[in-house]
Image (cartoon, rainbow, N blue to C red):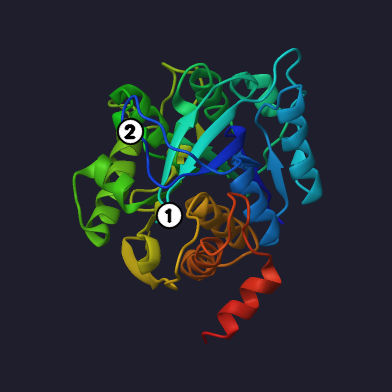
Amino acid sequence: MPRVIHTAQALVDLVVEVPSIPPRGGNVMAPPPTSYAGGAVNILLAAARSGAEAVHAGAIGTGPNGDLIRAALEAEGVAYTAPPVPDMDTAVCVVMVEPTAERTFVTTMAAERRVTVSSLATSRPEPGDLVCVSGYSLFEPTREPLLAWLESLPGGVVVVLDPGAPFAAMPEGIRERMLALTDVWSSNAHEAFELTGVEDPEESIAAVADELSRTHSARECPTTGNPSHTHLTGQRHPHVEREAGSAVVIVRDGARGCWVHEDGTTTYVPGFPQTPVDTNGAGDAHTGALVARRAAGSGWVEAARWANAVGAMKVTRRGPATAPYAAEVEAFLESRA
């Protein structure tokens, strides 16, 4: 079965439940914080719990934070392939959670940003594997080694982009380069709007697909029409073999569910509204479950329904990496059949 390989940053989430976000220069009192393995761990654990063979290709530091990451991955049978970064620990992400379950973040950077083409290559992707990329990885210093490695992948490897909030504000050249490598886009509705300027999710999803097709076409040689990445690698890149209109786009819209655009057709997949207690990691859980079910052979629409259930269950649980296990999801879906 194809594997799910994640390239993003595994961080320690330091979660603080606050009555409200303090004003600039202000202060609020809060109960003791809780530390969780987060970041890329959210997607990896969700994928593993939905039945995938999951692999972390990113960097992990040396120290108590790195130990927490490794322990969380090992507990769920998730492999990590890159050697540990010496003399530097993994960073933390401070997560302030309000009573409404809304989250505000401060992300620091440390060992998890020390990736190289060689360290990423230890994951050894093969045709059929799904390689997940986060838009947050397109900041320096991870940007260049990540893009260079993606451009070296063999044909048949599926690149899944979770753009995150920063992607639309990235330099145009970086966005174009990443989109040309992307086979599957998975984002929330706001991120799709930020890229396309189209507010309605059902319409923005087609606009995202158009962007992927456009960047693919733009990477063809203007004289022969043949794909060319020679200005980047000196070699033809396998991902530009994607046919026009073949990109897959998934756009989430919270409790409403998501839309799936495939082969030029958009399908609405209803959600399962819940009363949330913590939305931290819900989108990650959705993406992890989505790619896991795809790796297991499900179609994208079927995988999206499963992922909607995972996201719905996750928001009823506190902590970022709290996606349900497959048996729980099956029972949840059966109760709503």
Q: Percent position (x, y) of residue 13?
A: 59, 38
Q: Amino acid at mark 2?
A: Gly
**Badge 2: how crowded within 10 Å, few (<14), some, or many (20+)?**
few
- State the SS at label 2: loop
**Contact, mark 2 vs mark 1 (Cβ under 8 Å):** no
Q: Percent position (x, y) of residue 206?
A: 27, 55
The foreground one among 290 and 158 is 290
Q: CA distance from mark 2 to mark 1?
A: 55 Å
Q: In the figure, residue 23 lies in which quadrant?
A: top left
Q: Which residue is mark 2?
A: 225
Q: Percent position (x, y) of residue 50?
A: 66, 62
**From where the camera sits, is residue 154 visible?**
no
Q: Which residue is mark 1?
A: 99
The foreground one among 214 and 169 is 169
Question: What residue lies at 57% left-to-right and 86% top-to-bottom?
Answer: 335
Left or right, residue 11 beside residue 235: right
Of the residues tagged 2 and 1, which is closer to the observer?
1
- State the SS at label 1: loop
* Marks 2 and 1, the one that precedes in the sequence: 1
Q: Is residue 336 above or below residue 162?
A: below
Q: In the figure, residue 92 lies in which quadrant?
A: top right
The foreground one among 1 and 161 is 161
The foreground one among 219 and 265 is 265
Q: Is residue 189 above or below residue 80?
A: below
